[in-house]
Image (cartoon, rainbow, N blue to C red):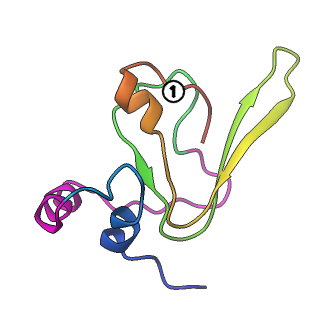
Amino acid sequence: MAEPLDPTTALASHRLFAALSEADLKRLIEHMHKRQYDRGENIFFKGDNGDSLQLVTRGRVKISTTSAEGREAILNVIQPGEIFGEIALLDGGPRTADA
């Protein structure tokens, strides 16, 4: 399995964080919590409180929703170096999909 990405490098290259100084990035990273999930394990569900964003450093994360008929619709697949969950964090609303 590939080595996880360095969070500093990943955030510094992301459009939301690219303008931050090295010191600001360091402060941001000090507030990060490393978590590992098993394949198929949910990170959050649609409707959950959106109080954080996630940075993928290894593996992939499927973003999906379920229709009224119970069919899953895959909205995106998040790759290493990408973030997700920022919409609910920024707008204060609940999660709009499952991850």
Please state the total of marks drawn on the protein image: 1
In the rendered image, the quadrant that contains the N terminus is bottom right
User: Is residue 91 in the magenta section?
Assistant: no
Report the amino acid beneath label 1: Arg
Q: Which residue is mark 1?
A: 95
Query: Where on the picture, by quarter, is residue 90?
Result: top left
Q: Residues within 10 Å of mark 1 (few under 14, many from 20)?
A: many
Q: Is residue 46 above or below residue 9?
A: above
In the rendered image, the quadrant that contains the C terminus is top right
Q: Is residue 83 above or below residue 23?
A: above
Name the one closer to the observer, 17 or 51.
17
Query: Percent position (x, y) of residue 14?
Result: 42, 59
Query: Percent position (x, y) of residue 36?
Result: 46, 63
Is 95 left, or right, of 26 in this rendering?
right
Residue located at (14% from left, 58% from top): 24
Q: Which residues are magenta?
A: 21-42
Name the one closer to the observer, 65 or 26.
26
Is 93 left, or right, of 68 in this rendering?
left
Residue located at (47% from left, 68% from top): 57
Most extreme residue toward the front is 19
Residue located at (11% from left, 65% from top): 23
Query: Percent position (x, y) of residue 85?
Result: 47, 39
User: Is residue 26 in the magenta section?
Assistant: yes
Name the one closer to the observer, 85 or 16.
16
Query: Where on the picture, by quarter, is residue 50?
Result: top left
Residue located at (49% from left, 85% from top): 3
| Mark 1 secondary-structure assignment | loop
